[in-house]
Image (cartoon, grey):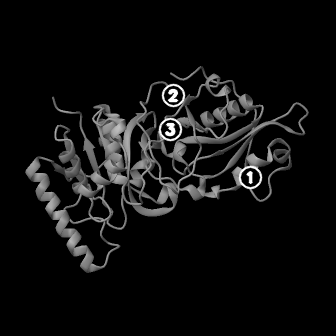
Amino acid sequence: MPPPRDTSVKSTVIPFDPAAPNARLRRLVHHDVLERWRAADRSAHAPRIVAVPGGDGDDWAAAALVTARPHTAYLKIVDAVGDVPTAVEAVVSHARDRGLAQVKWEGWTVNPEVAALGFVPLSVPLAQDAESSGPGAGHVRWLHDGEVTEPPYYGQTTHFTCGAVTALVAQAHAGELARESFDRRAELTLWRDATNFPACEPVGLGVAVRRAWPSSPVTVLLDTERPVLLDQYPQDEQEWRAVLQRASREEAGRIGVPIDSHPLSMTTVRSALGRREHVLLLVSLADMQGFDVPHWVLCHGAVPGALVIEDPWTHTAAGDTWVDAHLLPVPDLSLDAMSTISPDRIRGAVIIGRTEA
């Protein structure tokens, strides 16, 4: 349960301009911290300064740099400076005013005040791509009643293993995969069984999950019978990948993986989560990251107004880190829009049920 509701803190919220920081901000922020803020192009994540005026009204007593992926339901504190508790209270108050589900805090500097301010530590990643960078610690504070259990975070170590990683995270969260067995070998082994070279399409991924965990019920949701995720390839390369997708459909029938062709809805996703199932969801990254490419995420929790996902990929150049991608709340309507894949306009998912006795 979250701590009692914060007292509203009077604050000012302004855009962060890395080229010309506010004079009051420069007087408050240490040079090293400001350089970290400037090291990435955070413009796609709406960087803002939440500032609390000082007693004299001329300077700021506290400030925080906050960012967030577009079309999501959280704020991330990159750093809080000055009177840190007051800065954090101002951010939480601002997040509540916006109706958000969560505030996160990157742990660039570990602060003993974190726990007292209602934040709990996030489990550090099991793995990340070598190109990824991020803090060694992170914290989260939910702004609603209830609990979302935390799966392990694993950052995909290649550009193409997102489908395999989401399945492995789901099974680790369900207790079907020991965390010590969740490594790069497991990632690449499952991808090899699921891939349509190099991507994982829904039927092939569902079949691979069922083969890896025969006692886990698996349902594929895909609203077309045509081969999918092939438009970017030349015709001759589409043809052999289509052959593999047809083979996956035949294998699904043989091993008992149903393929549901009804259009996917967020109501379906919430119903599955209510049954403590996991939903591997195919989305486009256009809204969250600006890249209209297909990508797999894991839906594993629900809060008022948002679904909670694990995203195994981060955009380091935009200041995006594992703290953003882990326990990420996305409004239902936003996730619904993301789950329509262009240009085919398909929707696809794999639901992994609870293990059969």
Residue hosting label 1: 35
Front disc: 2 or 1: 1
Provide residue 36's location: percent of width, then percent of height.
70, 50
Q: CA distance from mark 2 to mark 1?
A: 34 Å
x and y, in percent, of residue 242 in the image: 20, 69
In this view, the residue farthest toward the top is 4
How dense is the environment of label 2, judged by Cα within 10 Å: few (below 14), some, or many (20 and up)? some
Does 39 sit left or right of 291 as displayed? right
Q: Is residue 250 visible to the viewer in this orientation of the structure?
A: yes
Give the mark nearest the N terminus, 3 or 1.
1
Q: Nearer the viewer, residue 322 or 117?
A: 322
Residue type indicated by callout 3? Val
Query: Tag 3 or tag 2, which sits nearer the N-term?
Result: 3
Whether residue 270 is visible here, answered yes or no, is no
Tell me how far mark 3 sits from mark 1, CA to CA: 24 Å
Label 3 residue SS: loop
Residue 62: x and y in percent read: 78, 35
Q: Secondary structure at mark 2?
A: loop
Residue depicted at 76% across the width and 48% down the height: 32
The residue carrying mark 3 is: 124
Above or below for 101 versus 1: below
Instruction: Determine contact: label 2, label 1, CB under 8 Å.
Output: no
Which amino acid is tagged 1? Glu
Q: Residue at x 55, y 48 (%)?
A: 321
Give the residue type at disc 2: His
Whichever of callouts 2 and 1 sits on the residue coming sooner in the sequence is 1
Which residue appears at 20% of the width and 73% of the height?
240
Residue 348 in which image quadrant: bottom left
